Amino acid sequence: MALRITPLDLLDILIVAVGLYKGIQLIRGTRATALLKGLAMLFAASLAARALSLRTVSWILEQSTTLIMVALPVVFYPELRRALEQLGRGQFFRTFSPAGKEEHQKAIDTIVKVTSKLRTRRVGALIAVERETGLQEYAETGVTLDAKLSEELLANVFEPNSPLHDGAVIVRSERMAAAACFLPLTETILDSQLGTRHRAAIGLSEQTDALVVVVSEETGAVSLAVGGRLHRYLNENRLREQLNHFWESRPEHPFWQRRGER
């Protein structure tokens, strides 16, 4: 008996395909991506255990999968909330065009120039540069800007006593996504000279692949946190080199390894 495909079947397939595509687009670049990869590996291991008749292993994997499926709504809460918000605003089907190399270089030059000026005046700053792992959940803790990155705007944000002075600025491509954002603090024991900004910078770099630039308010020293490591006492040229080096590369020290400073 020949399989008959009707126009409604094609529409059904198209709707499912678009929904899956937008769902993947939504979680791409977030920590949910790694969790989904883990679930896929768990599912593959379960199939292999069944094929090899490993009953005990298969039972353990099945129970683990059940527990994980129950916990998924909690784990994916930020992504689910974001999807519902975008759906309500009619932005779910909006496309996103990542910035190219030229935009990245402009962003790096802007950040380096601003940090150099802030260092001279000993004005504290905390700038998180988004890479593959999305920082939207941290951006939502601050004030949404979605403004083109410029030296004037970035410098004014960190002016003492300004409304957005405390907290971090999140840079996404060539735009300032948000300011006055709260970042997770590291639990690693640090040098007593390092304050909350440095703890937040390292904490974010432990949990994501972001590049986090810190200007110390006490000493004016510029540091860069990446992969759970803190690169300290960077001059203008060295900071530019480090940002260019790490922008499109993976962190040299993943967050699950032992952290330290240098």
Image (cartoon, grey):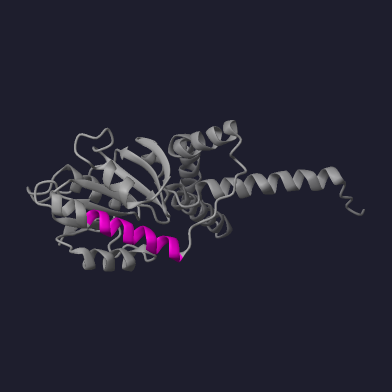
Start and end of the magenta stretch? 101-115
As drawn, which residue projects farthest toward the right? 1
Q: Nearer the viewer, residue 210 or 217?
A: 217
**Residue 182: percent from left, percent from top:** 29, 38
Q: Nearer the viewer, residue 62 or 32?
A: 32
As drawn, which residue projects farthest toward the front? 152
| Quadrant for the C terminus in the image | bottom left
Q: Is residue 247 left or right of residue 11?
A: left
Residue 191 visible from this viewpoint: yes
**Residue 55: percent from left, percent from top:** 51, 51
Query: Does residue 81 lie above or below 135 as drawn?
Result: above
Q: Is residue 225 left or right of residue 17?
A: left
Residue 10: say if magenta. no
As drawn, which residue projects farthest toward the top? 88
**Residue 232: percent from left, percent from top:** 16, 60
Q: Is residue 199 left or right of residue 172?
A: left
Residue placed at 18% from the left, 62% from the top? Answer: 234
Prevailing secondary structure class for the magenta stretch in the rendered image: helix
Residue placed at 45% from the left, 37% from the top? Answer: 78
Residue placed at 43% from the left, 39% from the top? Answer: 75
Q: Nearer the viewer, residue 79 or 37?
A: 79
